[in-house]
Image (spheres, rainbow, N blue to C red):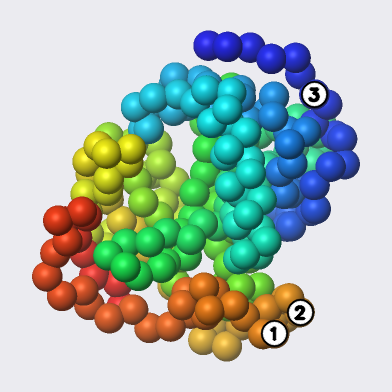
Amino acid sequence: MKTHPEISPSVPCGRIITKSPRLILREMTRKDFPLLCAMLQDPEVMDAWERTFSDNEVREWIDRNRIRYRDFGFGYWLAFDRTTGENIGQLGILPEEIEGKVHAGIGWMLQRKQWGKGYAAEGGKACLEYAFRELRVPRVIAEIRPSNHRSIRVAERLGMEPAGVYDKVVDGKIMPHRIYCARTEDPTPISPDSRLEEPSAELEALRTPIPQPQGTSPRHALRFRIS
Protein backbone atom coordinates (compact mmCIF):
# COMPACT_ATOMS: atom_id res chain seq x y z
CA MET A 1 0.00 0.00 0.00
CA LYS A 2 1.30 3.44 -0.93
CA THR A 3 2.00 5.73 2.01
CA HIS A 4 1.73 9.49 2.33
CA PRO A 5 2.83 12.01 4.98
CA GLU A 6 0.21 12.49 7.67
CA ILE A 7 -1.78 15.67 7.94
CA SER A 8 -3.16 16.77 11.28
CA PRO A 9 -6.86 15.75 11.42
CA SER A 10 -7.52 18.74 13.65
CA VAL A 11 -6.89 21.21 10.79
CA PRO A 12 -10.18 23.16 10.47
CA CYS A 13 -10.56 22.77 6.71
CA GLY A 14 -14.12 21.52 6.23
CA ARG A 15 -17.63 22.57 7.27
CA ILE A 16 -18.94 20.59 10.27
CA ILE A 17 -22.17 18.76 9.38
CA THR A 18 -23.22 16.84 12.48
CA LYS A 19 -21.94 15.22 15.67
CA SER A 20 -22.50 12.06 17.69
CA PRO A 21 -21.33 11.25 21.23
CA ARG A 22 -17.84 10.34 20.00
CA LEU A 23 -17.63 11.73 16.47
CA ILE A 24 -17.59 14.93 14.46
CA LEU A 25 -18.54 14.66 10.78
CA ARG A 26 -17.30 17.38 8.45
CA GLU A 27 -16.97 17.99 4.72
CA MET A 28 -13.75 16.85 3.08
CA THR A 29 -11.39 19.12 1.16
CA ARG A 30 -8.29 18.53 -0.97
CA LYS A 31 -6.20 19.01 2.17
CA ASP A 32 -7.58 15.65 3.32
CA PHE A 33 -5.84 13.79 0.49
CA PRO A 34 -3.53 11.78 2.83
CA LEU A 35 -6.44 10.69 5.03
CA LEU A 36 -8.41 9.49 2.03
CA CYS A 37 -5.38 7.65 0.64
CA ALA A 38 -5.09 5.74 3.91
CA MET A 39 -8.53 4.26 3.27
CA LEU A 40 -8.91 4.15 -0.49
CA GLN A 41 -5.46 2.60 -1.02
CA ASP A 42 -5.82 -0.05 1.70
CA PRO A 43 -6.70 -3.44 0.11
CA GLU A 44 -8.55 -4.62 3.22
CA VAL A 45 -10.67 -1.47 3.49
CA MET A 46 -11.41 -1.68 -0.25
CA ASP A 47 -12.14 -5.39 -0.30
CA ALA A 48 -15.79 -4.87 -1.32
CA TRP A 49 -14.63 -2.75 -4.27
CA GLU A 50 -12.17 -5.48 -5.32
CA ARG A 51 -9.51 -2.87 -6.07
CA THR A 52 -7.72 0.13 -4.59
CA PHE A 53 -7.56 3.70 -5.90
CA SER A 54 -4.65 5.48 -7.55
CA ASP A 55 -3.61 8.93 -6.33
CA ASN A 56 -5.57 10.54 -9.17
CA GLU A 57 -8.67 8.49 -8.30
CA VAL A 58 -8.43 9.65 -4.68
CA ARG A 59 -8.35 13.26 -5.88
CA GLU A 60 -11.34 12.54 -8.13
CA TRP A 61 -13.15 10.99 -5.13
CA ILE A 62 -12.66 14.21 -3.15
CA ASP A 63 -13.80 16.36 -6.06
CA ARG A 64 -16.84 14.15 -6.67
CA ASN A 65 -17.96 14.50 -3.08
CA ARG A 66 -17.47 18.25 -3.15
CA ILE A 67 -19.70 18.37 -6.23
CA ARG A 68 -22.29 16.37 -4.25
CA TYR A 69 -22.09 18.94 -1.45
CA ARG A 70 -22.79 21.68 -3.99
CA ASP A 71 -25.56 19.93 -5.93
CA PHE A 72 -27.30 17.92 -3.19
CA GLY A 73 -26.09 19.35 0.11
CA PHE A 74 -24.58 16.03 1.19
CA GLY A 75 -22.07 13.33 0.29
CA TYR A 76 -19.37 11.36 2.07
CA TRP A 77 -18.09 13.26 5.12
CA LEU A 78 -14.94 12.66 7.15
CA ALA A 79 -15.42 11.44 10.73
CA PHE A 80 -13.09 12.42 13.57
CA ASP A 81 -12.82 11.43 17.21
CA ARG A 82 -14.19 14.34 19.26
CA THR A 83 -11.56 13.86 21.99
CA THR A 84 -8.36 13.08 20.10
CA GLY A 85 -9.06 14.59 16.66
CA GLU A 86 -8.00 11.30 15.09
CA ASN A 87 -9.58 10.40 11.75
CA ILE A 88 -11.97 7.47 12.07
CA GLY A 89 -13.08 7.16 8.46
CA GLN A 90 -15.75 8.53 6.15
CA LEU A 91 -19.52 8.24 6.35
CA GLY A 92 -22.35 10.05 4.68
CA ILE A 93 -25.47 10.28 2.55
CA LEU A 94 -25.15 9.60 -1.17
CA PRO A 95 -27.46 9.94 -4.18
CA GLU A 96 -27.82 6.35 -5.42
CA GLU A 97 -29.38 5.75 -8.83
CA ILE A 98 -31.07 2.37 -9.37
CA GLU A 99 -33.15 1.63 -12.44
CA GLY A 100 -33.45 5.31 -13.28
CA LYS A 101 -34.66 6.24 -9.77
CA VAL A 102 -32.58 8.32 -7.37
CA HIS A 103 -32.49 7.16 -3.74
CA ALA A 104 -30.86 8.66 -0.66
CA GLY A 105 -28.23 6.09 0.31
CA ILE A 106 -26.04 5.76 3.37
CA GLY A 107 -22.42 4.64 3.24
CA TRP A 108 -19.49 4.15 5.58
CA MET A 109 -15.79 3.31 5.22
CA LEU A 110 -13.49 3.25 8.23
CA GLN A 111 -9.76 3.27 8.74
CA ARG A 112 -8.77 -0.36 9.32
CA LYS A 113 -7.45 0.29 12.84
CA GLN A 114 -10.88 1.70 13.81
CA TRP A 115 -12.84 -1.46 12.98
CA GLY A 116 -14.76 -3.22 15.73
CA LYS A 117 -15.25 -0.14 17.93
CA GLY A 118 -18.86 0.67 17.04
CA TYR A 119 -17.98 3.79 15.04
CA ALA A 120 -19.78 2.73 11.86
CA ALA A 121 -23.08 2.20 13.67
CA GLU A 122 -22.70 5.40 15.70
CA GLY A 123 -21.80 7.50 12.69
CA GLY A 124 -24.42 5.76 10.57
CA LYS A 125 -27.09 6.64 13.12
CA ALA A 126 -26.01 10.30 12.98
CA CYS A 127 -26.24 10.21 9.18
CA LEU A 128 -29.72 8.66 9.23
CA GLU A 129 -30.93 11.28 11.70
CA TYR A 130 -29.48 14.01 9.49
CA ALA A 131 -31.18 12.58 6.40
CA PHE A 132 -34.58 12.38 8.08
CA ARG A 133 -34.40 15.63 10.07
CA GLU A 134 -32.50 18.00 7.78
CA LEU A 135 -32.95 16.58 4.27
CA ARG A 136 -36.52 15.43 5.00
CA VAL A 137 -36.24 12.27 2.92
CA PRO A 138 -38.78 9.52 3.78
CA ARG A 139 -36.35 6.63 3.42
CA VAL A 140 -32.64 5.83 3.19
CA ILE A 141 -31.11 2.76 1.56
CA ALA A 142 -27.75 1.01 1.90
CA GLU A 143 -26.10 -0.98 -0.88
CA ILE A 144 -23.93 -3.77 0.58
CA ARG A 145 -21.98 -6.60 -1.04
CA PRO A 146 -23.28 -10.01 0.18
CA SER A 147 -19.79 -10.95 1.39
CA ASN A 148 -19.41 -7.74 3.45
CA HIS A 149 -20.65 -9.22 6.71
CA ARG A 150 -19.33 -6.31 8.80
CA SER A 151 -21.47 -3.80 6.91
CA ILE A 152 -24.49 -6.08 6.98
CA ARG A 153 -24.22 -6.21 10.77
CA VAL A 154 -23.96 -2.41 10.88
CA ALA A 155 -27.12 -2.04 8.77
CA GLU A 156 -28.94 -4.44 11.08
CA ARG A 157 -27.77 -2.50 14.15
CA LEU A 158 -29.20 0.64 12.53
CA GLY A 159 -32.56 -1.08 12.22
CA MET A 160 -32.40 -1.23 8.44
CA GLU A 161 -34.46 -3.97 6.83
CA PRO A 162 -33.58 -6.15 3.82
CA ALA A 163 -35.29 -4.86 0.66
CA GLY A 164 -33.88 -7.20 -1.99
CA VAL A 165 -30.81 -7.50 -4.20
CA TYR A 166 -29.60 -6.16 -7.51
CA ASP A 167 -26.62 -6.46 -9.84
CA LYS A 168 -24.71 -3.20 -9.87
CA VAL A 169 -22.31 -2.46 -12.71
CA VAL A 170 -19.05 -0.87 -11.49
CA ASP A 171 -16.33 -0.11 -14.02
CA GLY A 172 -17.96 -2.54 -16.43
CA LYS A 173 -18.08 -5.34 -13.86
CA ILE A 174 -21.31 -6.83 -12.46
CA MET A 175 -21.21 -6.71 -8.66
CA PRO A 176 -24.24 -8.12 -6.75
CA HIS A 177 -25.46 -5.96 -3.86
CA ARG A 178 -27.99 -6.42 -1.10
CA ILE A 179 -30.30 -3.49 -0.43
CA TYR A 180 -31.27 -2.45 3.11
CA CYS A 181 -33.82 0.26 3.89
CA ALA A 182 -34.68 2.55 6.82
CA ARG A 183 -37.78 4.77 6.98
CA THR A 184 -38.48 7.82 9.10
CA GLU A 185 -41.00 7.46 11.91
CA ASP A 186 -41.89 11.14 11.60
CA PRO A 187 -43.71 11.97 8.34
CA THR A 188 -43.20 15.71 8.95
CA PRO A 189 -39.60 16.18 10.17
CA ILE A 190 -38.83 19.51 11.83
CA SER A 191 -35.98 22.02 11.59
CA PRO A 192 -35.43 21.91 7.81
CA ASP A 193 -32.14 23.31 6.58
CA SER A 194 -32.70 26.76 5.12
CA ARG A 195 -30.71 25.72 2.04
CA LEU A 196 -33.48 23.28 1.22
CA GLU A 197 -36.43 25.68 1.33
CA GLU A 198 -36.37 25.64 -2.48
CA PRO A 199 -34.96 22.16 -3.17
CA SER A 200 -33.33 21.27 -6.44
CA ALA A 201 -35.05 18.86 -8.81
CA GLU A 202 -32.45 16.26 -7.86
CA LEU A 203 -33.18 16.56 -4.16
CA GLU A 204 -36.93 16.67 -4.73
CA ALA A 205 -36.63 13.34 -6.53
CA LEU A 206 -35.30 11.83 -3.29
CA ARG A 207 -38.48 12.88 -1.49
CA THR A 208 -41.04 11.53 -3.95
CA PRO A 209 -42.73 8.14 -3.54
CA ILE A 210 -40.84 5.33 -5.23
CA PRO A 211 -43.11 3.04 -7.30
CA GLN A 212 -42.49 -0.66 -7.66
CA PRO A 213 -40.13 -1.08 -10.63
CA GLN A 214 -41.58 -2.75 -13.71
CA GLY A 215 -39.44 -5.42 -15.32
CA THR A 216 -35.66 -5.52 -15.18
CA SER A 217 -32.84 -3.61 -16.76
CA PRO A 218 -30.06 -5.36 -18.68
CA ARG A 219 -27.70 -3.01 -16.83
CA HIS A 220 -28.86 -3.53 -13.25
CA ALA A 221 -31.03 -6.67 -13.16
CA LEU A 222 -33.19 -5.10 -10.45
CA ARG A 223 -34.85 -7.46 -7.97
CA PHE A 224 -36.14 -5.38 -5.08
CA ARG A 225 -38.97 -3.15 -3.97
CA ILE A 226 -38.90 -0.08 -1.74
CA SER A 227 -42.25 1.47 -0.85
Crowd tier of the residue under label 2, counting other residues whose Cα lies within 10 Å: few below 14, some 14–19, many 20 or above: few
- Residue 18 position within the rendered picture, expressed as x and y whole percent measured from the top left: 73, 57
Query: Label for residue 85?
Result: none
Q: Which residue is mark 3?
A: 7
Q: Quadrant of residue 38?
A: top right
**At 80% from the left edge and 47% from the top edge, which residue is drawn?**
14
Q: Quadrant of residue 227?
A: bottom left
Residue 223, compared with residue 41, is above or below; it is below
- Residue 16 position within the rendered picture, expressed as x and y whole percent measured from the top left: 79, 53
Mark found first going from the N terminus, 2 or 3:
3
Local SS, label 3: loop
Local SS, label 1: loop
Residue 112, compared with residue 81, is above or below; it is above
Q: Are marks 1 and 2 in contact (CB under 8 Å)?
A: yes
> Which residue ends up furthest to the bottom in the rendered image?
188
Q: Is residue 80 left or right of residue 217?
A: right
Alpha-carbon span between mark 1 and mark 2 = 5 Å
Residue closer to the observer: 4 or 124:
4
Residue 206, compared with residue 14, is above or below; it is below
Q: Which residue is mark 2?
A: 194
- Residue 45 position within the rendered picture, expressed as x and y whole percent measured from the top left: 47, 26
Query: What's under tag 3, amino acid-wise?
Result: Ile
Crowd tier of the residue under label 3, counting other residues whose Cα lies within 10 Å: few below 14, some 14–19, many 20 or above: few
Query: What's under tag 1, amino acid-wise?
Result: Glu
Q: Which residue is mark 1?
A: 197
Alpha-carbon span between mark 3 and mark 1 = 37 Å
